[in-house]
Image (cartoon, grey):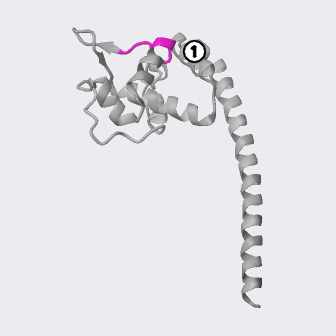
Amino acid sequence: MTATETEAGPAARAVHSCAAPPAPDRLPDGQDKYTISQVVAFTGLTAHTLRWYERIGLMPHVDRSHTGQRRFSNRDLDWLALVGKLRLTGMPVAKMVRYAELVRQGVDTFEERQELLEQTRRDVRLRIAELQDTLSVLDFKIDSYADARRASERF
């Protein structure tokens, strides 16, 4: 699985590349074969998590060396960055796996992918609104305490 959806071409790479800044030690495309420990260092994910992502179908096409060791590409790193953003949205793992399945199925699934992401965006916007309301309450309480402290200092 890669972050770029090959049927969408170079434009997709630009969009998905926005999901994460390039790691400072990335190799040029074509020479990009990273070990699991390098990917752990780049992403902050654990090796266990990377293996689990592969097992559940979230990253099903990780290359292997002749000795069977996983070899990740820049595109895999881009995909992991997107998965990380989807995790931050609160998207359930099952929906992320579904999204990955849809990507693998190709251009015929654009509509379903779009709907899945639009629903996630709606959920994120609702959470942002809730957090903004919560922030307003906190600001009010902080201001109340500051006012009370100033008033008590006058006496």
Residue 59 visible to an observer of this rendering: no
Residue 21 location, x and y as percent?
41, 42
Does 128 sit above or below residue 154?
Answer: above
- Residue 74 is situated, as x and y percent measured from the top left of the image, at 34, 28
x and y percent of residue 154 in the render? Answer: 75, 90
Describe the element under mark 1 as helix, strand or loop: helix
Q: Is residue 134 left or right of residue 16?
A: right
Residue drawn 40% across and 34% down?
43
Report the residue at 76% width, 84% height from top.
Answer: 152
Instruction: Give whichever of 81, 46 is nearer the camera.
Output: 46
Estimate the x, y position of residue 36 in percent, counting from the top left: 32, 24
Q: Answer whether residue 85 is magenta in the image.
A: no
Quarter of image, res 14: top left
* Left or right of residue 33, residue 101 in this image: right
Extent of the magenta region: 55-62
The residue drawn where x is 77% and y is 65% is 140
Q: Quadrant of the N terminus?
A: top left
Q: Quadrant of the C terminus?
A: bottom right
Q: Residue 61 lies in magenta, yes or no?
A: yes
Residue labelled with disc 1:
102
